[in-house]
Image (cartoon, rainbow, N blue to C red):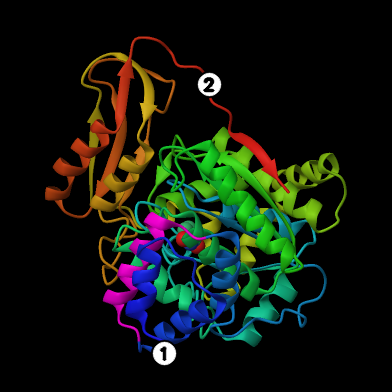
Amino acid sequence: MRMYDLIEKKKRGGSLSAEEIAYMVREFVAGDIPDYQMSAMLMAVYFKGMDDREITDLTLEMAHSGDMVDLTPIEGIKADKHSTGGVGDKTTLVTGPIVAACGVKVAKMSGRGLGHTGGTVDKLESIPGFKTAIPRDEFFRIVNENGLALIGQSGNMVPADKKLYALRDVTATVDSIPLIASSIMSKKLAAGSDCIVLDVKTGSGAFMKSLEDSISLAREMVSIGTLAGRRCCALITNMDVPLGHAIGNSLEMEEAIETLKGRGPEDLTCVSLELAANMLHMAGKGDMEQCRKLAKGAMKDGSALKCLKSMVESQGGDGRYVEHPDLFAKAPLSREVRAPEAGCITHMDTEGIGVASVMLGAGRNKKEDTIDYSAGILLRKKYGDRVEAGETMAVLYASHEELFGPAAEKFLASCTLGKQKPEPEPLIFARVS
Ligand code: URA
């Protein structure tokens, strides 16, 4: 078999057989298919798509490209969640501790920032000392003791996704249903949890911009999960507007902690609680109403915050940051972005706002780039808000003065001002099970 022929076949819209997919994944992971050939294949898949059988074969092959985690040393039902990626999406940092505080184990592998979206691993690493790579036994022990551990894709887990994810990030091949579905579900299947709740983002800041595509992605992933014997459902949530007010790693950590203290923005609180309630429901903790009450209770009585603090300490981080989030390092420079005219914000190009935060140093342009944890954006105004001419719409944070001009320009170009207050949009559009 030759990779050249497989690229040619996919370029012409053909369907790759199970053997061809197995060959491609195996040889790519072994380093015998170079990045340039895999990049061509990714672009061919982007344009020609894959059928359901190909997506399932690709997912299973990727999941088995490395170690499959056996979570049986962790007692009880294990629940996992995964977001398809968004701007300001720090729900894992809120939802994980809530679910664990309600007695359901969360042994979660998270990702790094991808394209214009942030990643939980980068956010957690803004806590001094926090380790996202820990030995397997240690991971199990922490989950058994705390109910929760959040780590990166460590060791030899899903190496196929590690390599593909990094390549897609720099070849403009992220927003493809087969590639997102196989990337996410291979990690979820390899990570071994019994229940999986998928947060499929939709709108201008999501990889899937239309509700229709988001529902197709959700159906694809739920079907792969169910076929693999897991309890699986998906929520389609709004990413037409950044979630919460903070974008950027340590800024988002601070906001997640405030949310666990009950003082978070309404949208972030609502989506996090609903995801948590679905995880609890999947894990058999009761009907949806009972699970919503449980989730709210864990936020209100402080048990979820306590759980986050003990997880941070168990993973080598400084727990004082959870109690006093003002300890997070602040960017040395800040710049206010002011409204050029009066009006209402009628549209936010949320991807553009994510790109502006990457331009400030909060994300990566190339896979080798390092992140400035303190860089990012605090939104003062969001979709539907009225602004006066010259009023502050957002504050930008960075470590180098020259980053502000282009980022401010990108931010302003991403916000549309109009005369009329727009209709409010739903936060959660649908549930797919
Ligand atoms: N998140 C993932 O883990 N993979 C993708 O492809 C997109 C978002």
Mark 1 vs mark 2: give the one in front. Answer: 1
Write the start and end of the magenta stretch as one range.
33-50
Query: Residue 203 in the image: x percent, y percent?
Result: 46, 37
Query: Residue 207 in the image: x percent, y percent?
Result: 43, 48
Residue carrying label 2: 424
Q: Is residue 292 left or right of residue 426?
A: right
Q: Is residue 249 magenta?
A: no
Q: What residue lies at 45% left-to-right and 16% top-to-bottom?
A: 422
Q: Is residue 181 above or below residue 301?
A: below
Q: Is residue 411 above or below residue 180?
A: above
Number of the label disc, if any, that sits on residue 30:
1
From where the camera sits, is residue 319 visible?
A: no
Amino acid carrying label 1: it is Ala
Question: Sequence order check: which comes first, mark 1 or mark 2?
Answer: 1
Prevailing SS of the magenta stretch: helix
What is the crowding at mark 2: few (fewer than 14 residues within 10 Å), some, or many (at least 20)?
few
Figure disc tally: 2
Amino acid carrying label 2: it is Pro
The picture quadrant where one finds residue 92 is bottom right
Numbered disc 2: secondary structure:
loop
* Gap in angstroms between the C-alphas marked 1 and 2: 50 Å
